[in-house]
Image: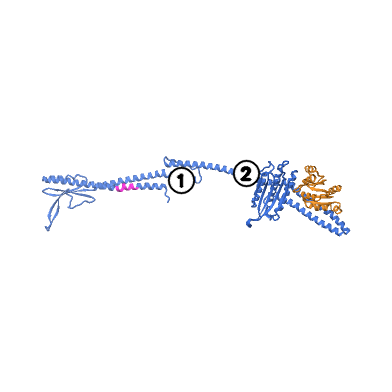
Amino acid sequence: MFIALKTKIWLTVLTIVLLFTCFTLIYFPLKQGESLLHNYNNEVQNHANTVALGVRIALKEQNYEGVQTAMQFVRGAPGFEFVSLLQVDTVWNEKHDSFIIKETVFGTYPDSVHVKPGQVSTDSIIIKRAPFQTPEMSGDIEVGFSTKEIIESKHKIQRTSLMASGGIFILGLLISLWLARNISVPVRVLRDAARRVGQGDLTANINCISNDEIGDLGKAFNIMVSDISKAREELREINQTLSDTNQRLNTTLTDLKATQTQLIHAEKMASLGEMTAGIAHEIQNPLNFVNNFSEINSELVDELHDELKKGDMQSANEIARNIKENEEKIVFHGKRADSIVKSMLLHSRTGSGQKELTDLNDMVDEYVRLAYHGMRAKDKTFNVDFKTELDPELPKINMIPQDIGRVLLNLINNAFQALNSAPYPPEGGHKKSPKVSVITKHIPPLGGRGQNSVQISITDNGPGIPDSIKDKIFQPFFTTKPTGKGTGLGLSLSYDIINAHGGEIKVDSIEGEGTTFTIILPV
Amino acid sequence: MKILVVDDETDVKMLFEQRFRKEIREGEMHFAFAFSGEEALGFLNSNPHEAVLILSDINMPGMSGLELLQQIKQKYFQPPPRVMMITAYGDKENFDTAMRLGADDFLTKPLEFPVLKEKLKAIL
């Protein structure tokens, strides 16, 4: 249950005031009244005792006037009603079997008051007795005093109490108001300011600063808000900086991605460029055959006509058979040229290719030739032997042909280049004829379990790879070629491509002996 | 006189047989074929007394045409047979090497068969 601080202060102060008021209004007058009455009773008793003493002395002296004087001694006392002399005798009762006390009113002053024996105090009158005894007479002095003054005094006290209570009550109210103002109001201001800060308004500030803990709280609050405001401003600036940095990073990333794409394309084009001469040569051979066999066929057709005119059917049949054979060669070499052009286009194509079942042997054969003639075309002194050992049992592999083609081309090119750059063996030394061999092998699953795979190894007997760079060769942009000669992406891309095909590529190299790159692809 | 054609392209055999079909038919020319330098050396070793004219490609896997030329001219055969080199790379360096090694002629691909025919006829 929510009870406002103000209400609590009000309730507390009101409770205290009410308790105090109850005390002043009820308990205090009651006690005062009782005290007054008690004192008055004593006073009246004293009057009775005094009169009794005077009467006893006067009676002893048998001075009846003195008795009169003694009795009238109290007449001037405030509240005096009457004084009476009662004679008390012990007499037989009517049956004369026991004694009774007989009281007789001997005299009363003033005479107008009629006093009966056995009279007691009431609210309006207090009656007290005092005994006396003389040889002549024993009795009681009875005095009566009015309580009028006492009652008036009590009323007076009650009125004073009421006024005092009222005063205290009003004072209490004023204190409540003041406390509420000094505690509740600043606390509410703080609360409202805190709410505004919570809603994001950092201009919220406490203006009414009192000189107490709440004032300190207000000051602390102001400092806190100012700190938060500063911190938020700093945060905003940092965020802005971060956002700017992010923006720049994003731009850089986009640039890098674009550059990467360009580099990959450049790498492709570079390897393709190296192949251009090889491709030209490779196309030249089948084209020569196509041209030659076409020319021959053209001549043979003329000869066929001649033979037919002569009617030499045997010769004509012979010639026709030749034409047919030549035609087959034309088609064969035409297709050969076609496939070379196609593979070149495939190689230069960007974007992801589709996986298809491909004969790896054909591919190896083609790319070894391309690489060889490419090298040969560029460098006239290039003279490297190459050998292919292609496993006829090699299963077809599901792969992206242009990607694997690039890997093969890259590795074969590297092998040729390694040999070409190797120093010629010294005269008289062991002459090692430079040689590249490419071997394909079907690897059946181990122990009849697992997966079929194929292994392609490309070996050269060149200078080998120094141990110091062996673990770097697959890193992007690592190249041993002079600046501008190699992109440093060939092996890195090859590695990625083989990985993407679920295969592995590894290198074994002994310095001075040669290098073997081995690719294993799952079937 | 036998003409030994050395080329790694096997269809060269058919091509020569067709191109020189008249000469072969009339017995003017006799051709033999080898598809590598090693095979050519084997042929020469097994037919030592046949006077031979050799037409060899230069760019072949294994023993190249120039190596074959070197072996023929410097090592094995006396008197050395005539050797005509054929290559797609008709550059000066290739030409010079071939000449230094003792080549008798140097032809570039694509072969001009009428020209070759004239040359062969002149030699024969």
In the image: residue B67, left or right of residue A177: right
Q: Residue at x 78, y 55 (%)?
A: A331
Residue at the limit of the structure toward the top, as seen here: A211
Which of the two residues, A137 or A349, is positioned nearer the viewer here? A349
User: SS of the residue at dot 1?
Assistant: helix
Determine if the magenta segment contains residue A494.
Answer: no
User: SS of the residue at dot 2?
Assistant: helix
Q: CA distance from mark 2 to mark 1?
A: 49 Å
Q: Chain of mark 2?
A: A
> Crowding near pointer 1: few (<14 within 10 Å), some, many (20+)?
few
> Crowding near pointer 2: few (<14 within 10 Å), some, many (20+)?
few
- Report whether residue A473 is seen: yes
Q: Earlier in the sequence, mark 2 or mark 1?
A: 1
Quarter-of-image position of residue A185: top left
Q: Chain of mark 1?
A: A
Which of the two residues, A18 or A469, is positioned nearer the viewer here? A469
Chain colored blue: A
Q: Residue at x 46, y 45 (%)?
A: A191
Which of the two residues, B84 or A427, is positioned nearer the viewer here? A427
The magenta segment: A18-27
In the image: residue A160, left or right of residue B95: left
- Report whether residue B111 is seen: no
Residue bearing the label numbered 1 = A191
Q: Nearer the viewer, mark 2 or mark 1?
A: 2
In the image: residue A104, left or right of residue A460: left
Q: What is chain B's hue in the picture?
A: orange
Residue B115's spot in the image, x, y percent?
84, 47
- Secondary structure predominantly adopted by residues drawn in magenta: helix
Residue A204's spot in the image, x, y percent?
49, 43
The amino acid sitting under disc 1 is Arg
Q: Which quadrant, please, contains the C terminus of chain A?
A: bottom right
Residue A252, numbered label: 2
